[in-house]
Amino acid sequence: MTVAEMTTRDRINELADLFDGDIILLEPERYDEAILGMCEQTGRVVYDRMLIIEIMMRDDGMDRDEAEEFFSFNTLGTQVEGYPIFVDRRCAE
């Protein structure tokens, strides 16, 4: 399989060999489109927080407040060692 044929998830899993431990990816896989990359220092996957919120709104029919609450409680509220990093790029705008 060429790099062009690989999904983001495939590329991340291939990079997992460079780091000790497991790489945690969010489920469902549709959140893969919010992946920004990986943190070289920790081997953790980095996601765009606002893009995850937009995916929830688009795919789950949530309004912004519902998506923010769901994300805060169910995603940020379940962090364990190696859990992904979430970047809020609104600060950069």
Image (cartoon, grey):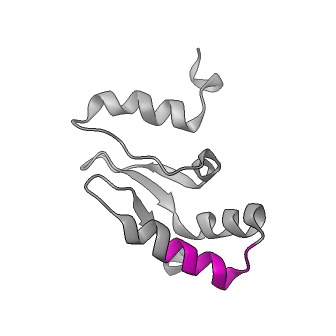
- Residue 63 part of the magenta-drawn span: yes
Q: Position of residue 46 (x, y in %)?
A: 43, 55
Let me know if residue 89 is in the magenta part.
no
Question: Measured from the top left, where is residue 16 in percent x and y?
Answer: 34, 33
Left or right: residue 59 versus residue 77 is right
* The quadrant where residue 18 appears: top left
Q: What residue sits 57% from the left and 23% below the top?
A: 3
Does the magenta stretch mainly form a helix, a strand or a loop? helix
Relative to 27, is 46 on the left or the right? left
Residue 67 image-quadrant placement: bottom right
Residue in front for this viewpoint, 44 or 28: 28
Q: Is residue 13 above or below residue 80?
A: above
Location of the C terminus by quadrant is bottom right
Residue at 60 percent across and 53 percent down: it is: 31
Relative placement, left or right, of 29 versus 10 is right
Q: Nearer the viewer, residue 6 or 71?
A: 71
Q: Tell me residue 39's x, y (percent).
A: 34, 50
Residue interval drawn in magenta: 62-72
Q: Which residue is at the front of the view, 16 or 77?
A: 77
> Where does the image place residue 34, in percent across and percent down from the top left?
58, 55
Instruction: Give the farthest residue toward the bottom.
Output: 65
Q: Taking the image as drawn, is residue 66 in sight?
A: yes
